[in-house]
Image (spheres, rainbow, N blue to C red):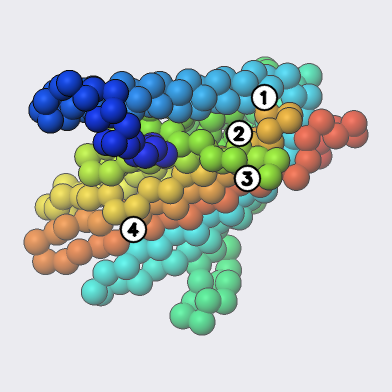
């Protein structure tokens, strides 16, 4: 997480502290290192907090945007190999407030070819109502609290993804590449498990946290890569990628569950607005 500079010269310290014993020098060096590490930690935390805040503030002012979403799910065990792909789109406009999402999930055969659509879901939310169209059966007004399927277990809006990093900025690393800030999570061990729970990543997987007891097993997060690509000048979130993998250790079998998510936003503040279907 930290880009630490360990270039401290014991020769310089000896010149400055020539009258001190070796023990005194070592103690002083340790104090200097500790202070600098703390300063750098504060600097990185403040930088990530500032970027996240600025980007969320920009999100609040956007008139509209459209995004594409692709999700790939894997389950691998000695007896089971499953791979499914979910493709979708997200459109939002501020006035009048409308959010439109549509997803289709299909399986892949052994050669990686797409099979028929297994599940589809479209949702249109306005300030006054919430409509859904499940598996192409037609639009119905629904309760916004209803969970229709695993497809929408997490909101993939840029604002929602940014909010995942609020409160855990001490685990957020910031890099710069050309005209982008790249924010990523840096954690390991138990912290990885906590991050995955905080981000509700288990709930999005083909096997989730609720499936672990029925397998009489325990779980371990083996990988969590969460990257946000933010424009330096506009503070607009352009793209996000998530790679999440965990292992369920069961008495008779182990399951490796993996999810890849890519959200790309090609259109922001289009003067023509967004495209969405009529629900009446």
Contact between marks 3 and 2 (CB within 8 A): the answer is no
Residue 164 or residue 107, whichever sits in front: 164
Q: Position of residue 260 (x, y in %)?
A: 48, 55
Provide the secondary structure element on which disc 3 rests. strand
Earlier sequence position, callout 4 versus callout 2: 2
Reading the image, the residue beneath label 1 is 59
Residue found at x 47% / y 44% = 226
Reading the image, the residue beneath label 3 is 177
Whole-angstrom CA distance, mark 1 to mark 2, is: 8 Å
Residue 249 or residue 44, whichever sits in front: 44
Residue 278 appears in view: no
Contact between marks 3 and 1 (CB within 8 A): the answer is no
Whole-angstrom CA distance, mark 3 to mark 2, is: 20 Å
Earlier sequence position, callout 1 versus callout 2: 1
Residue 257 is labelled as 4
Label 3 Cα crowd, 10 Å radius (few <14 / some 14-19 / many 20+): few
Provide the secondary structure element on which disc 2 rests. helix
């Amino acid at each position: 997480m930290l880009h630490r500079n360990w270039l401290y010269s014991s020769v310089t310290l000896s010149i400055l502290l020539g009258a001190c014993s070796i023990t005194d020098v070592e103690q002083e060096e340790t104090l200097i290192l500790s202070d600098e590490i703390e300063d750098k930690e504060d600097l990185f935390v403040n930088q990530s907090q500032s970027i996240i805040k600025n980007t969320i503030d920009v999100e609040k002012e956007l008139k509209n945007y459209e995004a594409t979403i692709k999700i790939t799910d894997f389950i691998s065990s000695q007896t089971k190999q499953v791979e499914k792909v979910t493709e979708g789109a997200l459109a939002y406009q501020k006035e009048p407030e409308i959010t439109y999402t549509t997803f289709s999930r299909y399986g892949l055969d052994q050669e990686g070819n797409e099979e028929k659509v297994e599940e589809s879901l479209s949702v249109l939310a306005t300030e006054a109502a919430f409509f859904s169209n499940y598996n192409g059966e037609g639009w119905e007004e629904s309760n916004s609290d209803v969970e229709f399927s695993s497809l929408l277990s997490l909101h993939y809006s840029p604002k929602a993804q940014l909010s995942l990093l609020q409160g855990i900025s001490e685990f957020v690393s910031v890099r710069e590449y050309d005209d982008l800030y790249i924010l990523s999570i840096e954690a390991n061990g138990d912290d990885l498990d906590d991050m995955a729970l905080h981000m509700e990543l288990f709930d999005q997987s083909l096997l989730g946290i609720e499936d672990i007891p029925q397998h009489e097993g325990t779980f371990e997060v083996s990988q969590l890569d969460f990257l946000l690509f933010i424009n330096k000048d506009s503070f607009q979130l352009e793209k996000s990628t998530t790679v999440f993998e965990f292992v369920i250790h069961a008495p008779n079998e182990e399951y490796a569950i993996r999810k890849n998510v890519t959200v790309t936003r090609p259109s922001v503040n289009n003067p023509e607005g967004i495209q969405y279907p009529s629900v009446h």
